[in-house]
Image (cartoon, rainbow, N blue to C red):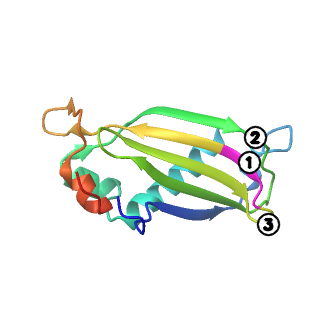
Amino acid sequence: MSASLDLSHEIEVVPAFYDIDPMEIVWHGHYVKYLELARSALLRKFDYDYPRMRASGYAWPIVEMRLKYVRPAELGQRLIVRAEVLEWENRLRIGYRIRDAATSRKLTEASTIQVAVDLATREMLYVCPGVLWQRLGVRP
């Protein structure tokens, strides 16, 4: 992989009132929504968002998700959600870091694993299809 290749993307998210739980912090389940927003933006950066995936003949279901909550996020707090492609050979593994926009303090770390499924056969592939490699600009 080229040292200048940037396989990451950042977005800003501001938790709204409906994201807050009775403890007055962001409910843990809403972090999954923030990851999805960052993952979607990252994939759009490489022109391989979900509609493009489907058009290329593949679905990419999430088969594993891991989250580690370090500090809680609060109502109106500006958050930076960074998504980065960490693995693409046999599966698509994306790492995430959510941090406070003002202080850069880490709030959450996470990762997701997606696998390619051939839409025609409904079979899971054990090697990522070449279209992913092309979109990311990496070589086999």
Tell me whether the residue at label 2 lies in contact with that at label 1, contact meaning CB atoms closer than 8 angstroms. yes
Q: Which residue is mark 3?
A: 102
Picture layout, residue 76 above or below residue 113: below
**Residue depicted at 43% across the width and 60% down the height:** 7
Q: Is residue 70 left or right of residue 109?
A: right
**Residue depicted at 79% across the width and 44% down the height:** 72
Q: Earlier in the sequence, mark 3 or mark 2?
A: 2
Residues at marks 2 and 1, CA–CA distance in whole angstroms: 5 Å
Q: Callout 2, which amino acid?
A: Val
Q: Which residues are magenta?
A: 104-108
Q: Looking at this view, is 113 or 57 the one in front? A: 113
List the single residue furthest toward the front.
Answer: 3
Residue 107 tag number? 1
Q: Quadrant of the N terminus?
A: bottom left
Tell me whether the residue at label 3 lies in contact with that at label 2, contact meaning CB atoms closer than 8 angstroms. no
Q: Callout 1, which amino acid?
A: Leu
Residues at marks 3 and 1, CA–CA distance in whole angstroms: 12 Å
> Is disc 3 surrounded by few (<14), some (14 to 19) or many (20+) residues within 10 Å?
few
Q: Which residue is mark 2?
A: 70
- What secondary structure characterizes most of the magenta part? strand
Residues at marks 3 and 2, CA–CA distance in whole angstroms: 17 Å
> Is disc 2 surrounded by few (<14), some (14 to 19) or many (20+) residues within 10 Å?
few
In the structure shown, which secondary structural element does the residue marked by tag 3 occupy? loop
Q: Callout 3, which amino acid?
A: Ala
Residue 117 colored in magenta in the image: no
In the structure shown, which secondary structural element does the residue marked by tag 1 occupy? strand
